[in-house]
Image: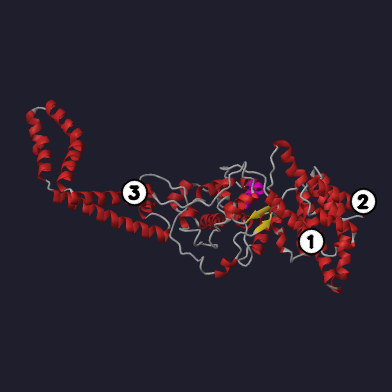
Amino acid sequence: MTSRVSMFLNTLTPKFYVALTGTSSLISGLILIFEWWYFRKYGTSFIEQVSVSHLRPLLGGVDNSAPNSPSSSNGDADSSRQSVSECKVWRNPLNLFRGAEYNRYTWVTGREPLTYYDMNLSAQDHQTFFTCDSDHLRPADAIMQKAWRERNPQARITAAHEALDLEDCATAYILLAEEEATTIVEAEKLFKQALKIGESCYRRSQQLQHHGAQYEAQHRRDTNVLVYIKRRLAMCSRKLGRTREAVKMMRDLMKEFPLLSMFNIHENLLESLLELQNYADVQAVLAKYDDISLPKSATICYTAALLKARAVSDKFSPEAASRRGLSTAEMNAVEAIHRAVEFNPHVPKYLLEMKSLILPPEHILKRGDSEAIAYTFFHLQHWKRVEGALNLLHCTWEGTFRMIPYPLEKGHLFYPYPVCTETADRELLPTVFHEVSVYPKKELPFFILFTAGLCSFTAMLALLTHQFPELMGVFAKAFLSTLFAPLNFIMEKVESILPSSLWHQLTRI
């Protein structure tokens, strides 16, 4: 056996090595080109897809991810989506109370839950919503106009008390309810006092709104104040367990001021309805606000996914689904989860408790980590309440990233994921004790990297063999001799053990 291996190696010429390595390099290059083209077009490796979809089931494996079929992108169909401001910061519809909730966290942990940038945005919001050019005509409003600009919380509270010493002022009560009240019960009492004054001012300015630009500005300010007070009162009721009362207050507010969609009151309503497990009304609200012309949010997308998952999640099994395929209802649920994950990919890790939650900021960046925190902070309990919903999410959410080859350049259902979200989220979130989530980078499949390495290695061997044929021949013989050394050793042992006649018959076979 040893003599035959030596004879075979001695008969190989340098031309054979050149031809062998050159052919291997050519084949590897062709495979690499095909794999790269397939990955660019469909977002997955062809070899990986074949092995997972066809070979793995034959070997008894189960794929826990969603079915991954190449799908065409319609992200280019609506070019108007590109005009959306990518990093517009929105007021968090479910922001907490500073005095009763954010400050309580600071007392316990010694950490500041809100960043300076976030609080500065809130100060700008307060000046926009609660002040107007005619505030100098009323002494209390003039003091509050300065109070909203104060950076020191104690200075703002002191100014609010000074305004109330002069006359009843709705915005002064708002500030005290938000920042001085240490419990939700105290905040609710102050908001109820603000409501009486706010309604009186609103009725008075409503009668004068058409008498000039000054009165129009006053009416706009009084409307904002009234809506804010009623909304916060509804949130107090929700936090104190009076959920049905909160739902009624929110519905009445939406009917009374239907054009003030910028406050996103429907998101508060959705959360309260989910708490009541009134899924039919949740679906009705989604049917109204989950519209192509309206800006999406994590609340809209993930609530829609939760409702569709609820229909199948209690009986969903990844093993059974891999054997029989997905039913229509399961496919709808998986597609809804993919849609939600494409809109905001950071939410699943918080829902699945793979990443720690922190208190939500007062402002959020849609599709960003800040929005994911704000959504999960209030909706995790609703996902846990639906049996099997988190299991279905766990089995399917990662499949989204294989469906979208280049989400930063071209989306599947939404416009491309904004690249500036990480920078904005670092301004909104306390990075001292929270690691900001970033969009999952799409890594090249192992087979593409392996093929590229194999192609480069064989090309290098072909080049070296062409330049130094005799030296490479010696290396090749040495390598093959080393490779066959264990086999030669085994064969020698077998020859010494077996009778020579039997061994002779086996070698002839």
Instruction: Give, as a three-letter code, the residue at label 2.
Output: Asp
Give the magenta part as a residue range: 370-380
Horizontally, residue 328 falls left or right of residue 254, namely: left
Upstream in the sequence, badge 1 or badge 3?
1
At 42% from the left and 46% from the top, the residue drawn is 62
Q: Is residue 138 located in the magenta-colored stretch of the structure? A: no
At 29% from the left and 52% from the top, the residue drawn is 455
Instruction: Give, as a three-letter code, the residue at label 1.
Output: Asn
Q: Residues within 10 Å of mark 2 (few under 14, many from 20)?
A: few
At 79% from the left and 54% from the top, the residue drawn is 148
Which residue is identified by label 1?
224
Q: Quadrant of the N terminus?
A: top left
Which residue is identified by label 2?
165
Q: Residue furthest right?
A: 166
* Mark in front: 2 vs 3: 2
Instruction: Give, as a three-letter code, the residue at label 3.
Output: Phe
Seen from the viewer's position, the closer of residues 425 and 303 is 425
Seen from the viewer's position, the closer of residues 169 and 487 is 169
Residue 339, image x and y in percent? 55, 58
State whether residue 40 is above or below residue 383: below
Which residue is identified by label 3?
450
Horizontally, residue 454 falls left or right of residue 397, namely: left
Q: Are marks 2 and 1 in contact (CB under 8 Å)?
A: no
Q: Residues within 10 Å of mark 3 (few under 14, many from 20)?
A: few
Which of the 4 image quarters holds residue 181?
top right
Residue 362, image x and y in percent? 70, 51
